[in-house]
Image (tube, rainbow, N blue to C red):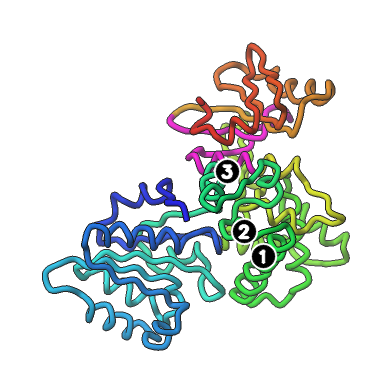
Amino acid sequence: MIVRNHYIDPIRPFFESDLIKIITGIRRCGKSVILNQIADEYRAQGKPVLCMDFEKLEYSSEIPDAAALNDYVKAHMPEDEKLYVFLDEVQLVKDWQIACRSLRLENLSLFITGSNSKLLSREFAKELSGRYVSFCVRPFVYKEILEYTRQLGKECSITDYLVYGGFPKRFEFPDQETVTAYLNDLNQTIIINDIMNRYRIRKTELFKRLVNYVLISNARIFSANSIQHYLASEKLTCSINTVMKYLSYLEEAYVIRKVPQYSTRSKRELSFYAKNYDEDVSFNTIRQKNGRFDLTHNLENIVYNELIYRGYEVSVFTKNGQEIDFLAQKNRKEYLVQVAYSVAEEKTYEREFALFNELDQSRKKILITNDDIDYSTSTVEHIQLSRFLLMESLEG
């Protein structure tokens, strides 16, 4: 597995801190691997390390609750040296948060991760109020995919990324059939086993239909009201509050990311309309029928994922009823980013470039497409997707 220093480097300043280091993120995005990679750094320095994975019977049977966890860790503490403790799937221990709050006061540095129906990733923070720093891990972006597939002696095309996304484990499977089976099983685990069980959702058909609609509608603007109308058209009735509650469950499990609109008129973000992006585009793909893939919206979703990975704050930009896909902000610089699968056809070219025409040059204007030809103008930089995916920032 590749060393994901993009995520480890921000944690390093807290390596010696008494704050609990929480590594969060959607299931199977690589949290446990990063936990082990940090532990390996300490081992390489000859420092004492204690690692426990509570999905393993040897730990879950011996350490059922907070008192047992507290006693076990203290029994392994050296006399005159700091201990580095790594707890994976710690939510499987009863009252784990009580033990963690107590252990952080000892001469140790504590790292934890986990996510399942007992506790979703985003909920960890609620259990440790004020005593933690959290770091969110995501599925692979394309540069990471290239590095990992080289390790495996494989290749991954951009189209493959647009269709099947970046969950690390899927690259180990030999063919499309097994990859699809793995992704379907992961979807079942997250949506059914984790979210529905965690929140004891009784309206199972309603929830599943809402989830399918939202995940297959990635990179589109809609509101809770529009989702309610869709469900009503499918003969499923629910309140706006129920829709909003179900959407919040998806966010807490890192299944979707909500991107608000930014209005130039009010100079603020509008929360009642938003775009939802899938944490991984495979959630869209496995819901497609007849072997067709939604490459257009997945491409926009991929650009969003890459921008977030590179540290940009992202919103949807609107002015006078015109929408630009992204207003990306970082280091006091702002970029207007429009995404299209192709602008080779004249009508598409005119439509996409027209969106920039009434905007001044205070922000850099960027168009990202899957075309090989450079369509840059004097005011708009065209970046081919193949180049964008290898860039470190929007500056190059």
| Residue in the picture at 34% in, 71% down | 51
Q: Nearer the viewer, residue 255 or 43?
A: 43
Q: Amino acid at mark 3?
A: Tyr
Where is mark 1, residue-wise?
A: 182
111 sits to left or right of 319: left
Mark 1 vs 3, N-terminal side: 3
Magenta stretch holds residue 226: no
Where is mark 2, residue-wise?
A: 170
Mark 2 vs 3, N-terminal side: 3
Residue 84 placement (x, y as % from top left)? 27, 66
Q: Residue furthest left?
A: 80
Structural distance between the alpha carbons of marks 2 and 3: 14 Å
Residue 21 quadrant: bottom left
| Residue in the picture at 67% in, 72% down | 192
Q: Residues within 10 Å of mark 1 (few under 14, many from 20)?
A: some
Look at the numbered disc 1 and give the secondary structure of its residue. Answer: helix
The answer to whether the residue labelled 1 contacts the one labelled 2, judged by CB atoms less than 8 Å apart, is: yes
Where is mark 3, residue-wise?
A: 142
Residue 158 placement (x, y as % from top left)? 66, 41
Vertical order, 240 against 63 (above or below): above
Q: Residues within 10 Å of mark 3 (few under 14, many from 20)?
A: many
Structural distance between the alpha carbons of marks 1 and 2: 7 Å
| Residue in the picture at 39% in, 82% down | 59
202 sits to left or right of 64: right
Magenta stretch holds residue 305: yes
Look at the numbered disc 2 and give the secondary structure of its residue. Answer: helix
Tell me where the magenta segment starts and ends, as one range.
302-331
Residue 344 quadrant: top right
Q: Nearer the viewer, residue 83 or 190?
A: 83
Q: Residue furthest front?
A: 153
Vertical order, 44 against 140 (above or below): below
Residue 135 quadrant: bottom left
